[in-house]
């Protein structure tokens, strides 16, 4: 069952140096108890998309078009007060930098308790119990003592767990996780992911995972959207995507991953060129300057996000298995026969 | 900057000759801006700071050229005992002519006064801002007073600069225990409430009214000069030391050392340019404090003595002349305006400098 | 904590000792003795010499001056009841110009007045500056904010005697609502307290505003917003405490500044406080009184700074008590 439906979302920033199109025409659907991944390099527009839903963008941002339907409400049309009621309660955001995200001058218990008091109007003792339970759930032993500590007394990993607990305190339907790996090392990263999965099973939360890390997306998500320069260029179930990417960009990403089983001495294969300057509006496909398959058509017109095989859309196949790619040349892409190996490095 | 054309490369890493040419051409086209020009541009864009700079430059120019201006003598008392309010018709109602005996000056100033006589003859400005109780023209006293105040402020600020920067730099470079010890000394000195200590020292070095002994003494003004300069070297030393220590620990200095650069080179190429902004800003902050301190001392009668004139003295005269019967408002208002505007300009300039020299690069990204 | 206080006391003792010794040296190095500027009859001069122990060797004079043991014949070597004396015991000697009084007597009389004025000025500065700064920070770039910032800039930039002069001009002479000078009733303290406290109110307002804006720009505020906390709760619960931190750490220098400023204000408004005594002693060359006042003020400022340093970790748990 779908929890959040976003359609044709576009966000523009008005900067002193001109208009910056951060997100163009992004659509996706979040399902209950499923994880959707938004994958892309820095600046591709992942965070902006997520922040736009909760109206947490800076004042220079303008949501130009689009709709975001959540539980029958149109998020983009809500007033500030109604949005505040949703934030943290029905839609929770776990931001990427856990180190500074907590108030250094208040105890953990107080900060967690505030969320409960604000949203659920609990009394202090009840709130405290619930906070302790939440901390225990995220794997912080001796949670009662943690409640009285200050953030600087905890390690980075512990702080991230506290934030996760805070996000899940009010049992939200949607959890947006922004770059869960950037502040942690690999083992802790794995633990975090396991934690999120378990909590997802227990609470039935829909998770929107934003990441640069392909391995992470492959592991944690059921469905993945690949973003480039503010647009979605490919959308597919995770396994299918990593087994056989369609869009040249996705291909390039996966091919550039160092492979564990590659013969020694084999050179790495990065995607040539650099990401486009977001201030310079481009006609045509944003990836065209870097794409080996680009033709004149690609440079002239932006390719729409279309199902891969003609006639596949609306044929009774579930959305979950639908594949879409935004490329004029996808006919020239052959799906590799060996769909076995994923990009597990 | 034009977007760089990238060339579609085949597989592999190496650039062929054409690709190399493209890359080099792009590199040549890119032109970075040096920090100094960047800072200058930002200072200019800060309107308040830029106008303050112009105002201050004008002020310094006017005070330097004071002897050239057709003003009445700031020192000569006249026989009237009552302050005169400002007179607005800009024709000189003074019935007096320029009298050379009222001017007691040394070389350069005397030459400038002579030049003024050539230019303007006996023309003098009227009491546009009024006169004080001894008949001396207020405008003239303000202009001449600015000379003393500015000179003293600059001299003291430069003294504090010299002491503070060398001490702080030494401490920063030395590091370790020496630095700790040096900064402890600074801390102890900082803990003393400075004005009191200065006053106290002034008391002790105060020349007794006995003229015979005053010859042995340093003049009050020299003490003043040293005292005022000595005040702010402490803050400068602290600021410089903090910056130098931070720089020594910074990654690019460590990288330079790893690359084998000699200490002197590191000092010259890396430390000095990065300490300069901090020193400049601190200097801009010291100047108003020094001017204020000098004004305070002169106001209390412990600074500049008549017949020389300074803004602090003018403020003191103004307040002394206040009485409930006749309100000599011009004696208070104009020195207040002069001092206020100069200090305000310094403050705005300091703020602008701080913003312009901030290397962290804020506010540029969307 | 105990170690911190001990270190502070040690430094204070060191500073006080340094001051006393410095004054002693300078007094000896300066021209003539206390009676140099007057011509006295030889008998009186001999009396003066005896009083100031000018016949003693230098070391004995120094230790007698320093204390705590009274090396006078009446003290250590004679009358046991006068065992303790010297600067360390508060006996700073007779005032050199106000012949009828000892320094500690003058201080006892004038210090409370100064403290009253300074306290009034400082409390007033906090009471006006802190709310003004916070309110301005809540509505940045609005007209009220611009007005406050301009006023605050003027307040910090103008010397306090200029502010005093302007206030006198407007309130006392033109509008005649407050007395011009003197000390007696509460009304007499209003203008001096305003003039003395105004620059500090301005500074506190600026610090509070900047502190609030900076606190509101921090990451954890974004977290609070993302979790849907209402604005009032965010400001009061999270930003306010951070905003007050720079104000608290400013209180130490502010107190020192208020004491310094009182020198001038007491003169202008003819308030018989310790500040005007100091200035008077400076003009008259009264060393002992000058030292007395300087010592007391140093002690005061030092104590205040230490108190502020003790108080700061209560507000900001990240800061441990640092070495002085």
Image (tube, rainbow, N blue to C red):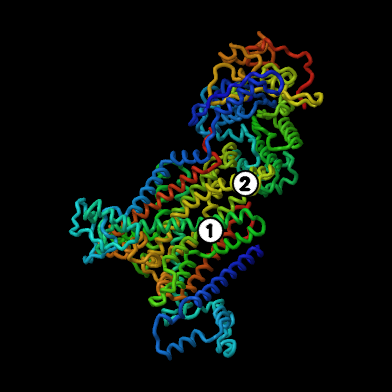
Q: Is residue A263 visible?
A: yes
Mark number, residue B80 = none
Mark number, residue B265 = 2
Identify the element where label 2 is drawn: helix
Q: Position of residue C173 (x, y in %)?
A: 28, 61
Direction top: furthest residue: A311
> Residue at the spot x=23%, y=65% of the render?
B78
- C103 versus C181 height, above or below: below
Q: Nearer the viewer, mark 1 or mark 2?
A: 2
Q: Is residue A27 left or right of residue C125?
A: right
Q: Chain of mark 2?
A: B
Are labels 1 and 2 assigned to the same chain? Answer: yes
Query: Which residue position is annotated with label 1?
Result: B163
Tally of marks:
2
> Residue at the spot x=42%, y=76% of the render?
B213
Q: Chain of mark 1?
A: B
- C140 versus C57 height, above or below: above
Q: Position of residue A286 (x, y in %)?
A: 59, 20
Q: Residues within 10 Å of mark 2 (few under 14, many from 20)?
A: few
**Which of the pair C18/A206 is nearer the observer?**
C18
**Which of the pair C246/C230 is nearer the observer?**
C246
């Amino acid at each position: 069952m779908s929890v959040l439906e976003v359609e044709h979302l576009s966000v523009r920033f008005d900067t002193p140096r001109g208009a910056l199109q951060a997100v163009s025409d992004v659509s996706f659907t979040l399902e209950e108890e499923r994880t959707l991944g938004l994958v892309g390099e820095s600046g591709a527009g992942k965070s902006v998309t997520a922040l736009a839903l909760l109206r947490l963008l800076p004042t220079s941002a303008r949501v130009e078009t689009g709709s975001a339907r959540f539980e029958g409400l149109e998020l983009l049309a809500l007033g500030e007060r109604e949005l505040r009621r949703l934030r943290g309660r029905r839609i929770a955001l776990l931001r990427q930098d856990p180190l500074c995200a907590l108030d250094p001058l208040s105890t953990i218990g107080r900060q967690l308790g505030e969320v409960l008091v604000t949203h659920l109007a609990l009394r202090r003792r009840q709130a405290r119990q619930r906070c302790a339970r939440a901390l225990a759930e995220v794997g912080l032993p001796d949670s009662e003592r943690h409640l009285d500590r200050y953030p600087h007394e905890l390690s980075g990993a512990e702080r991230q767990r506290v934030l996760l607990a805070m996000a899940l305190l009010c049992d939200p339907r949607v959890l947006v996780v922004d770059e869960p790996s950037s502040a942690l090392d690999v083992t802790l990263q794995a633990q975090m992911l396991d934690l999120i999965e378990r909590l997802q099973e227990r609470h039935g939360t829909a998770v929107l995972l934003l990441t640069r890390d392909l391995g992470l997306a492959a592991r944690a998500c059921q469905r993945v959207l690949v973003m480039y320069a503010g647009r979605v260029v490919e959308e597919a179930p995770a396994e299918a995507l990593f087994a056989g990417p369609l869009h040249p960009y996705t291909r390039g990403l996966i091919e550039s991953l160092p492979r564990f089983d590659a013969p020694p001495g084999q050179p790495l294969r990065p995607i040539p060129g650099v990401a486009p300057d977001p201030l310079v509006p481009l006609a045509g496909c944003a990836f065209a300057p870097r794409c080996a398959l680009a033709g004149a058509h690609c440079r002239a017109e932006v390719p729409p996000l279309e199902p891969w095989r003609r006639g596949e859309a609306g044929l009774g196949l579930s959305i979950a298995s639908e594949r879409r790619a935004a490329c004029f040349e996808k006919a020239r892409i052959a799906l590799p026969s060996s769909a076995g190996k994923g990009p597990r490095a | 900057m034009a977007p760089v054309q990238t060339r579609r490369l085949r597989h592999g890493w190496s650039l062929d000759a054409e690709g190399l040419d493209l890359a080099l051409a792009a590199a040549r086209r890119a032109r970075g801006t040096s920090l100094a020009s960047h800072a200058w541009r930002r200072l200019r864009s800060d309107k308040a700071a830029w106008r303050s700079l112009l105002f201050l430059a004008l002020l310094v120019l006017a005070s330097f050229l004071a002897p050239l201006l057709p003003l009445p003598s700031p020192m000569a008392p006249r026989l009237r005992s009552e302050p005169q309010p400002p007179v607005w018709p800009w024709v000189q109602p003074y019935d007096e002519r320029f009298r050379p005996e009222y001017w007691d000056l040394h070389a350069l100033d005397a030459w400038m006064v002579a030049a003024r006589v050539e230019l303007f003859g006996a023309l003098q400005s009227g009491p546009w801002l009024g006169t004080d109780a001894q008949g001396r023209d207020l405008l003239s006293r303000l202009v001449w007073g600015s000379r003393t105040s500015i000179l003293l402020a600059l001299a003291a600020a430069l003294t504090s600069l010299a002491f503070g920067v060398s001490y702080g730099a030494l401490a920063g470079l030395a590091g370790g225990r020496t630095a700790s010890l040096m900064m402890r000394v600074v801390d102890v000195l900082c803990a003393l409430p400075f004005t009191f200590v200065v006053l106290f020292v002034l008391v002790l070095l105060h020349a007794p009214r006995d003229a015979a002994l005053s010859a042995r003494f340093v003049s009050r003004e020299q003490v003043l000069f040293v005292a005022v300069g000595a005040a702010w070297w402490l803050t400068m030393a602290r600021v410089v030391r903090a910056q130098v220590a931070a720089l020594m620990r910074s990654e690019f200095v460590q990288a330079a050392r790893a690359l084998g650069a000699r200490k002197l080179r590191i000092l010259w190429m890396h430390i000095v340019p990065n300490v300069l902004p901090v020193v400049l800003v601190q200097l801009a902050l010291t100047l108003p404090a020094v001017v204020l301190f000098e004004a305070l001392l002169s106001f209390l009668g412990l600074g500049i003595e008549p017949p020389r004139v300074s803004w602090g003295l003018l403020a003191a005269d103004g307040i002394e002349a206040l009485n409930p019967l006749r309100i000599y408002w011009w004696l208070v208002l104009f020195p207040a305006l002069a001092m206020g505007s100069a200090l305000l300009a310094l403050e705005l300039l300091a703020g602008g400098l701080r913003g312009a020299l901030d290397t962290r690069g804020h506010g540029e990204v969307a | 904590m105990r170690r911190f206080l001990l270190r502070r006391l040690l430094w204070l003792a060191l500073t006080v000792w340094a001051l006393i010794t410095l004054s002693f040296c300078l007094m000896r190095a300066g021209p003539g003795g206390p009676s140099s500027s007057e011509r006295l009859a030889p008998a009186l001069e001999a009396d003066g010499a005896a009083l100031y122990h000018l016949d003693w060797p230098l070391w004995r004079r120094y230790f007698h001056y320093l204390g705590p043991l009274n090396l006078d014949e009446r003290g250590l070597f004679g009358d046991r009841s006068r065992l303790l004396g010297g600067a360390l015991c508060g006996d700073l000697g007779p005032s050199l110009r106000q012949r009828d009084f000892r320094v500690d007597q003058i201080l006892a009389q004038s210090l409370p007045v100064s403290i009253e004025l300074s306290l009034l000025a400082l409390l007033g500065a906090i009471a006006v500056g802190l709310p003004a700064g916070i309110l301005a920070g809540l509505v940045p770039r609005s007209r009220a904010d611009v007005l406050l910032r301009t006023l605050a800039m003027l307040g910090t930039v103008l010397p306090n005697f200029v502010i005093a002069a302007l206030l006198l001009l407007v309130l006392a002479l033109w509008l005649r609502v407050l007395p011009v000078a003197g000390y007696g009733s509460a009304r007499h303290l209003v203008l001096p307290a305003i003039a003395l406290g105004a620059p500090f109110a301005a500074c506190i307002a600026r610090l509070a505003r900047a502190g609030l804006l900076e606190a509101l720009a921090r990451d954890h505020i974004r977290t609070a917003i993302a979790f849907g906390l209402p604005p009032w709760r965010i400001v009061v619960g999270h930003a306010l405490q951070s905003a007050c931190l720079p104000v608290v750490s400013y209180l130490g220098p502010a107190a020192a500044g208020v004491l310094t400023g009182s020198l001038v204000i007491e003169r202008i408004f003819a308030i018989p406080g310790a500040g005007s005594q100091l200035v008077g002693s400076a003009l008259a060359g009264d060393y002992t009184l000058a030292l007395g006042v300087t010592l007391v003020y140093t002690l005061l400022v030092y104590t205040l700074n230490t108190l502020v340093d003790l108080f700061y970790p209560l507000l900001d748990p990240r800061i441990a008590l640092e070495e002085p």
